[in-house]
Image: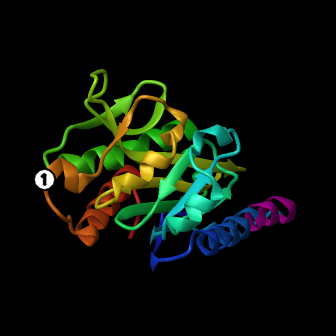
Amino acid sequence: MNKRLHIQDLGRKDYKETWDYQEQLFKEILDLKIRNRRESLDLKTPNHFLFVEHPHVYTLGKSGDMANLLVDEKILEEKGAAFYKINRGGDITYHGPGQIVGYPILDLDNFFTDIHKYLRYLEEMVILTLAEYDIKAERSPGETGVWLDVGTPFARKICAMGVRASRWVTMHGFALNVNADLGYFDMMIPCGIKGKAVTSLNVELGKKEVDLEEVKQKLLKHFQVLFEIES
């Protein structure tokens, strides 16, 4: 069992390039697990955590509905946005500058084999981080992610999540709006949920900009505690 974490901040990176890199790390862990089983070995599998900021892009999960993208390819081009159908759960999601995207690529055999618990821990990491900014965030029953003012007409999502797992190895992850341009969310039905607004940390704090690096460090701190990461 290996509870060490290899952390990388990729800066601003193209979505497809990052996806390919995730797939590479994901496959390396899977291959090692298969080798361990076939050859009766006990080689430690690594755990990765990638931070990244993407140029404007829309991604549609494998169970997503194309109708939730409200504009055609020409308008996407005009807005400088790309579009990909991908292999995570969930519906349509937007990524762009000012948003912290995190991709934990973990072997859950090193922690716990429970995808439901894994998602709840990712949500808790964000909830605890936002609490440090005096923002009360919470879960919305039946809707993965992190929300504000749940159960009121003002409910709004601040963090989207979607993961893929195979043999208890995870990829994809979360997208927390910190200084996001919320206009880009108007071109889709976020996560396929009609009638729910989206927000960003800077908007909630009434600031032009929030320090992204500071938020990343807070997220990482809570992640390391929740998952009992060893240094």
Between 76 and 96, the one lying in front of the other is 76
Between 16 and 194, the one lying in front of the other is 194
Between 23 and 220, the one lying in front of the other is 23
Q: Is residue 170 above or below residue 54?
A: above
Q: Position of residue 181 (x, y in %)?
A: 34, 59
Q: Position of residue 227 (x, y in %)?
A: 42, 52
Residue 210 image-quadrant placement: bottom left
Image quarter in which the N terminus is found = bottom right
Dominant SS of magenta comes to: helix
Does 38 lie within the magenta span?
Answer: yes
Residue 77 image-quadrant placement: bottom right
Q: Tell whether 159 sits left or right of 95.
A: left
Circle 1 SS class? loop
Q: Residues within 10 Å of mark 1 (few under 14, many from 20)?
A: few
Residue 97 image-quadrant placement: bottom left
Between 60 and 82, the one lying in front of the other is 82
Q: Tell whether 46 sits left or right of 187.
A: right
Q: Tell whether 172 sits left or right of 210.
A: right
Q: Mark 1 = which residue? A: 206
Q: Position of residue 60 (x, y in %)?
A: 63, 49
Please tell me which residue is depicted at 49% across the width and 54% down the height of the picture: 94
Image quarter in which the C terminus is found = bottom left
Q: Tell whether 106 sits left or right of 183.
A: right
Question: Which region shows up in magenta?
Answer: 31-39
